[in-house]
Amino acid sequence: MATIINMPRLSDTMEEGVVAKWLKNVGDKIEEGDILAEIETDKATMEFESFYEGTLLYIGIQEGETSPVDVLLAIIGEEDEDISAIISGSSESEKTAAKEEVKEETTAEVDATDAVVIPEGVQVIMMPRLSDTMTDGTVATWLKKVGDAVEEGDMLAEIETDKATMEFECFYEGTILYIGVQEGETAPVDSLLTIIGPAGTDVSAIVANGGNSMDAEKPTSDKKETKIADKVEEKKPVATTSTTSNRRIFASPLAKKIASDKGINLADVTGSGENGRIIKKDVENYTPAAKVVEVEVASDTNLVAAGQEKSKEVKNSQMRKAIAKSLGNSKFSAPDFSLNIEVDMDSAMASRKTINAIPDTKVSFNDMVVKACAMALQKHPQVNTSWTDNNTVYHSHIHVGVAVAVDDGLLVPVVKHTNQMSLTQIGATVRDLAGKARHKKISPAEMQGSTFTVSNLGMFGIENFTSIINQPNSAILSVGAIVEKPVVKNGQIVVGNTMKLTLTCDHRTVDGAVGAQFLQTLKTFIENPVTMLA
């Protein structure tokens, strides 16, 4: 099915872009992560990455051409797919947009008083679109505050999108005059984020108008150049991140990662960076001080309150919203069913011990399951499919997603071309991607394109569970804990080690017999690990 790619907004002020160079041609095969083109914005020339795979069917903006944001840039789909209706539809929409623009210009002439003039040197910064699917963002941390002097290249804030938490860089220099989205608040893309300019500048008129403005360098009579942004819905304040002493913690992402790995509470660390910001060396040099433990004895008054009911509302993160939407769509749209099987793990345990005895080698049981799944998918291509309204898409590539638990929910990094990788390569890749996911440093491209998913709760002692399909996959495997118990071997009851697997399938693409055959093949690979080393 064809995917339409529009001109992206690659900076907070970008209104249009120029295709400096196409790195792919019509007819070229595209993989996720491939660089499609170099696009020149009002800030810099940036590489534009593909989040999809397929064949480049159409290029809508040629090299050297300028185009507004959100205009058809390219189309990616299946080879020889008919996209004439999409192209003609885009042309009609562009004509409609042009008519609407003329109408808006006429309206702007009448309502020019709705816009205010930006004082010289003042820069109004809107919530940027940091991923192709981002519609709104949450300010996780402000690294600067009102009154701070900033320079080009300074990190202003950490912004949480539906994909990851990303640092947002300043392209200007001046003083922070206003912050429109507080820590923890969520705001739509293109709503007022902050204002930078000369210290002491009055920006109350800009704030009152939601960032809508007219450039001071252009005469107010030139109505055609006036651009009036949509009004932004008034936001409700929420509490900022703070320590027990109500001091906000400012720390670099690397410092946070190191602190998390070492189990250090950043509230106990003194920052040596700008404005007291905690940086890498502060965490590395931190030595915990001895703490006096105070025991508080409950008074009669506290005892009286023991029976009170109390609830607390916690704002849903962008990640949690995305998870809820995706899993809800899957559960309510796919007619699913589950199959269970129990696997003898004695040989797998012996093989893993032998493999891990090799220096600098580390393979987990989950790595072995992922490898076995990739090999089983090769033998049962019906499971390596995706359902669309008109077609069943058979994927020749095998990309296994591995579910990873993070603080805000669940992410699914994708091991690309899993069937072509060795056990040790899979292990190293999974550890790298899982680490990025837990620290919210994983890129959107590293979480897209899976054709099958593995979810493992065995490390939590869960013996058996059923997962929701990660669409557009046709199936997901739930992996339980390895349990030592009596088993029958050669007619004798002996102590053995078993693991339960549950395969949840989309019945639109995978029938019961197909799922059962897949599980039998998977069982054979796991119980005979030597077959996966060939």
Image: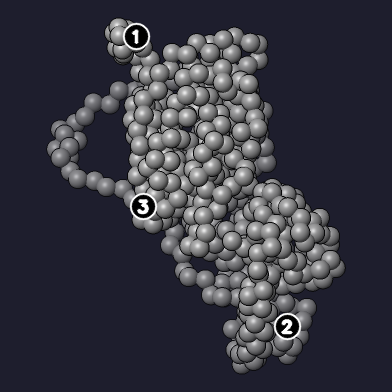
Mark 2 / mark 1, whichever is N-terminal: 2
- 487 left or right of 225? left
Residue 175 position within the rendered picture, expressed as x and y whole percent measured from the top left? 69, 58
Residue 121 position within the rendered picture, expressed as x and y whole percent measured from the top left? 75, 67
Q: Which residue is mark 3?
A: 335
Mark 3 / mark 2, whichever is N-terminal: 2
Q: CA distance from mark 3 to mark 2?
A: 53 Å
Q: Which residue is mark 1?
A: 490
Q: Residues within 10 Å of mark 3 (few under 14, many from 20)?
A: few
326 shown above or below 419: below
Q: Nearer the viewer, residue 514 or 5?
A: 514
Mark 1 / mark 3, whichever is N-terminal: 3
Residue 357 position within the rendered picture, expressed as x and y whole percent measured from the top left? 59, 9
Observer-side mark, 3 or 2, equals 3
Q: Quadrant of residue 281?
A: top right
Residue drawn at the location 38% of the way across and 15% of the way down? 497
For label 1, the SS is: loop
Q: Nearer the viewer, residue 170 or 471?
A: 471
Res 10 seen here:
no
Q: Which residue is mark 2?
A: 225
Residue drawn at the location 79% of the way across and 71% of the way down? 66
